[in-house]
Image (cartoon, grey):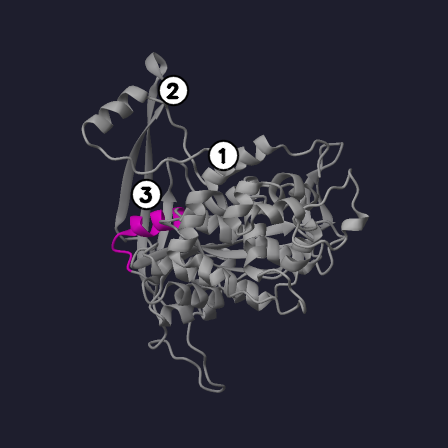
Amino acid sequence: MGSKRQSAAEVHANLRELLDWQFAERDDQAVAQALHHGQGVDAVYGLDDAGLLDGFFAFLDETGIKAHWQTLVLAGVRHVFLPASLFVLLYGTRVLFGSESSNALPGLLFSNVAAMTLIGCNAHQVADGMSCRGAKQRTAVSEYTLLDPQTLANAVCKISTAALQDLFNGTIRALAACGGFMAEVMVAGDGTRIVTAPTFQGCGKPAVSESQRNRRGLQGAVIQLLFGWRLIALLDLRTLIPLAIQSVPIQAHEAPYLGALVEQAQANLAPHSRLSRLVIDRAYGDGASLHALHELGITFVVLAKAHMVVRKVALAEQAGTTLYERTETVRRGHGREATTEVWVARVRGVSGLRHWDAFRPPVAAGRPLRWAPRPVLHAVIVNLWRNRTPAPEGARVYLTNATVSDPWAVVDGYADRSWIENGLFRNSQQFWRLTRWFPQKTAAGVHSHLTFVVMLLAVATA
């Protein structure tokens, strides 16, 4: 915990921010006129912690999410004196409160009668605790609370990996069942590092090379060790709700997990919606995985790697193809000093590429796949982007199994991929404390915290 204790006002501000409560103005005259003309009042909310949480908990009930959470079983705990779902609600509320430390929970959450009543406790339990165990050891300085904060941390960390996955996936299935997604869903896939201290048990430990300047100004490479895990996610680009997640060692390559994530996302959406389009960066350029998605009827867009033969062929065959140009007028400054700038972009499309050897079905030994039966890919080449010519390493080349008759649909679709970096990972790290305040310095503590944060973010976004 930091040098200063977190206050109740800070918790209140976190709730307003994470649950997306907006600023409003008081206008008694307008309200009186609306009531006089027969306009009804939708609802009246108190702006204390319970008032802010009330709508959120009602949403959990209406969508069936709370009922799903109540099916959780703590297989690693022999004697549980509380329903397992209560630990889910307690830790989920801790995430919404933005509590910086488990030790701060007695003063900020466990003693909050209104909030604890919503979770499922009564005033007597809040005042006197769940049981009298350990009461003799308590002093006036260490007053009795609902439960020891370490009890919550231990219980959350004993949720098995399979149970955590079911907890998250069932939440997304409940959102899909209540019409939370479009019939055809376009998603982006990406991963982010969860860097921890080396003292975390079970963390990955890859060596990475970073470019740094020394005191003389000379550029050099410095080898450093990174500790932690990697979170991989698929994000619905319309609602910005994560559909499937997987936490792996930080040194793990992301591409082999793509197929399983897509299958999980499809299962979470079915039968109400289906994943139809996928945009991913060059890290997921695995031909076998992308061909499996192609066989499932999923359209994908991926950025070609510099060394790929199919990229070199696309660049060589673009001559003579149709040049598509688009202009954008951008206004800069204000008032009399305002100026406008015209951005120009030019792209070309190349069809019928069969030069990615890995993009094909499995081939039996001794029976090479001939040229004609190979699956076809298409490419969009960016020759000019907003008045900027390609970098020295060459033009950007997007590979897709969709038609390139409208290349701007491919380019703009890939540009939407930035939402997973800015809308999910940056938001969850900056505001939802994704990479901080783990309940325990163990792999179980990290996996549990990541699952709860992304799950609560998904529900709050919905």
**Disc 2 residue crowd, few under 14, some 14–19, many 20+, Cα 10 Å:** few
Label 3 vs 1, first from the N-terminus: 1
Residue drawn 68% across the image and 55% down it:
131
Tell me the magenta residue range.
Answer: 403-415
Q: Which mark is residue 333?
A: 2
Q: Which residue is mark 3?
A: 346
Disc ID at residue 48: 1
From mark 3 to mark 1, how far is it between C-alphas?
54 Å
Task: Provide the secondary structure element on which disc 1 rests.
Answer: loop
Q: Residue furthest top?
A: 336
Closer to us: 339 or 454: 454
Query: Tags 2 and 3 in contact by the CB under 8 Å rule?
Result: no
Image: 69 above or below 29: below
How far apart are labels 2 and 1 at the CA level?
41 Å
Q: Nearer the viewer, mark 2 or mark 3?
A: 2
Closer to the N terminus: mark 2 or mark 1? Answer: 1
